[in-house]
Amino acid sequence: MMHDVWTVARKEWLEIFDQLLRFKRGGWSILLIIAFLGVISPLQLGTSWLSSPLMFFYWPLLTTSMTSTLIADSIAGERERHTLETLLASRLSDTAIILGKILAAVMYGFAFAATNLLIGWTVVNLKHGHGELLTIPAPRVAALLSLILGGSFFISGIGVFVSLRAATVRQAQQTFGVIILLLMMAPVIFAQFVAPERQANIISRASELGLETLSLRVAGGLGALALALNVAAIRRFKRGAVVLD
Amino acid sequence: MTVPAIRVQGLVRDFPKVRALDHLSFDVPAGIVFGFLGPNGAGKTTVIRVLLGLVNPTEGRTEVFGVDPRTGGEQVRQHAGALLEHNGVYERLTALQNLDFFGRAWHMSSGDRAARIRELLSQFGLWERRDESVGGWSRGMKQKLAVARAVLHRPRLVFLDEPTAGLDPVASASLRDDLARLAQQEGVTIFLTTHNLAEAERLCSLVGVIRRGQLLDFGTPAELRSARGAPIVRIGGRGLTDEVVQGLALTPGVGGVERDREEIRVQLVPGADVGAIVAWLVGAGVAIEEVRRDRASFEDVFLELVSSEGDKAPGVTR
């Protein structure tokens, strides 16, 4: 099974890297993001870049958006490019196809964030290290990477459902865009229905936990949700239905 | 008793507003090229989907080498290769990457994969272009790559859904030769659907004709021709006027007369006396230059089968 999952994920990466290397489909924008978040931002923030709480906001957000572009294409793209039925006629199992596509999207987003973090850390050290090795505390790195991974898995779980239902990549991206917007607005909507005292209580308890612990807990929650979504996606992915859709 | 490559028994597949397959029954022996013929929407692709376990039948039973695709779809697909309605090649990948992906999917070892890919790409004349993204290739080249992909893992059974559709005559002929060679060399069973009747007649040792989900006829191309195609006499000469043709059509033993450029094509009824027909023409003032016996073409047989409305063909071999 793992061999088949890896085979599908490898194919996905080959396809996306071909596009990136040819500077099609967002190739240039990725270079711009790396330049801004990996080079310009660390240069401007200096050593505070290593401890900025903003890290816990924009890195997961960025990774999530990278993952979402790939996962929206996963099934809808195969359908649009008329390769889906051939893939389904192969000996690959439904589970291997779905998990391979999720793995490719998650690892793509994760690798992108990790690379950017590494570049940023190198830039800060080169510019502000003055011969000393500046580090990000290990618990912070662990919490951040967990949050990035949990967020990516969660988004992939939703994305694969959207992609299964969509006839075209554009349709998948549009639907997915609306869902991501709703998810981002969820705290605002939540606040409308919760009394101010209760809100203050939640914020106070979150503050007591600290950023790292809170992030790890959120990552765990997202990971659990992602697992449930992935299991549901595998169950939903039935060859007959997908072919006839 | 030898297990047939494919066994279809009473196969029915209903879609919300249409019955796509209507009690189909036939067997395909192993190791032959089987041609599945029929007009657009006849149900050919649905049969392939059912046999590959991609779509479940509403009623009836199918077996591929003794395995029911409904319950053993993965097992069937493990031993089958397919070129479906669309060639299904990944246009962003190179030819090598395309085949490598499917080789990995079929758990071929690294060495075997590399050797087999080289063998097939060389055989199809694509080896020199193996590192190009196939998106820029011609349709014929993509189709060849798709055929190579279908036979890559040395399957026992290959489904080819209109493999020469949309190809120019040269590319079609070349692909046809490749398929014939593959069938002979690899010893696989090929399940071929095509609109090209000359292609079917040349390649297939057994054919089935389907229309609106029903099997109209089944047998070798020669059997279909002899069972369906009435004997024909082609007569060439001077003086074959419209009046003569009209008069000949009313002569005993003549089923019908058609003009075919400089000659006439006389369809004979069983037991017709060709000598009497020739004598009648001579008597009508025709200077006969050539008389030759012929049979209806495979295309004539096919058209006769699929154009007759609402009937069930008699004598269907199942």
Image: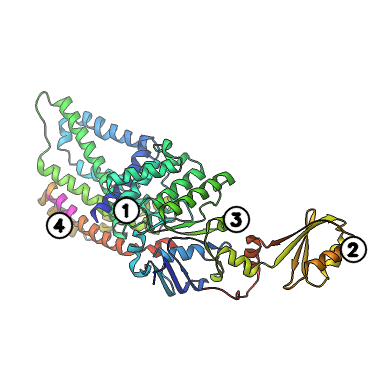
Say the numbered circle drawn on residue A201.
4
Label 3, on which residue? B198
The chain letter under disc 2 is B
The chain letter under disc 3 is B
Same subunit: marks 3 and 1: yes
Task: Give the amino acid type for the residue marked by disc 3 in the picture.
Answer: Ala
The structure residue drawn at horizontal position 48% and vertical position 43%, both measured from the top left corner, is: B141
**Is residue B38 something that shows in the picture?**
no
Above or below, B241 relative to A126: below
Above or below, A60 relative to B75: above
Report x, y in % for residue B126: 44, 40
Say which of marks 2 and 1 sits in front.
2
Task: Give the amino acid type for the residue marked by disc 2 in the picture.
Answer: Ala
Left or right relative to A1: residue B170? right
Mark closest to the chain's N terminus, 3 or 2: 3
Say which of marks 3 and 1 sits in front.
3
